[in-house]
Amino acid sequence: MSSFKQWMTYGSILMLTIASLTLAGCGSSKEITLGAKDNGTQIELEQGQTLAIALDSNPTTGYSWARDPAKAGDVLVQVGEAEYKSQSKLVGGGGIETLRYRADAPGKTTLTLIYRRPWEEGAKPAQTYTLEVSVR
């Protein structure tokens, strides 16, 4: 076998090995995405795993999703800022807002998200999303 063919063979084996090890190490950190249909349900996560909640939103109306501060626990920690993707080409059209949480510590918590205008403190939320979370 020529040196080039040997190098290509060993290089391919090395690349496959690295890819396999990388994927194997990502098992518990895989992101789980839930949406509106999962409101009121339960989920079990591994410590370190990421939970993404993707919900309809329209920030042009001033409304956005946020964790209810009165019901925040230490089992889940928010990862970054909420992300918004428009689903319409029209000005003022709605889209999807995604919030991410990392399962930080073993335990149980109720994740409660509220859809409201942040400056209207004390006002009843337009919508509420709850999820029972258990972290192992």
Image (cartoon, helix red, strand yellow):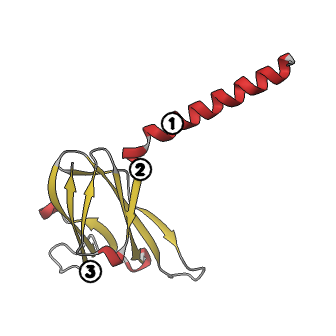
Q: Disc 2 vs disc 3: Cβ atoms closer than 8 Å?
A: no
Question: Of tags 3 and 1, which is closer to the observer?
Answer: 1
Q: Quadrant of residue 130?
A: bottom left
Residue sitting at x 51%, y 36%? 22
Amino acid tagged 1: Thr
Q: Which residue is mark 2?
A: 30
Residue 113: x percent and y percent? 25, 69
> Can you say whether 64 is above or below 88 in the image?
above
Q: Is residue 20 in view?
A: yes
Residue 135: x percent and y percent? 21, 51
Residue sitting at x 44%, y 77%? 60
Residue sitting at x 19%, y 56%? 134
Amino acid tagged 2: Lys
Q: CA distance from mark 2 to mark 3?
A: 28 Å
Amino acid tagged 3: Gln
Q: Secondary structure at mark 1?
A: helix
Please indicate whether residue 94 sits to the left or right of residue 68 in the image: right
Q: Which residue is mark 3?
A: 127
Q: Which residue is mark 1?
A: 22
Dot 3 or dot 1: first in sequence order is 1
Residue 103: x percent and y percent? 27, 49
Q: Residue furthest top?
A: 3
Q: What label does residue 88 carry, if any?
A: none
Question: Of tags 2 and 3, which is closer to the observer?
Answer: 2
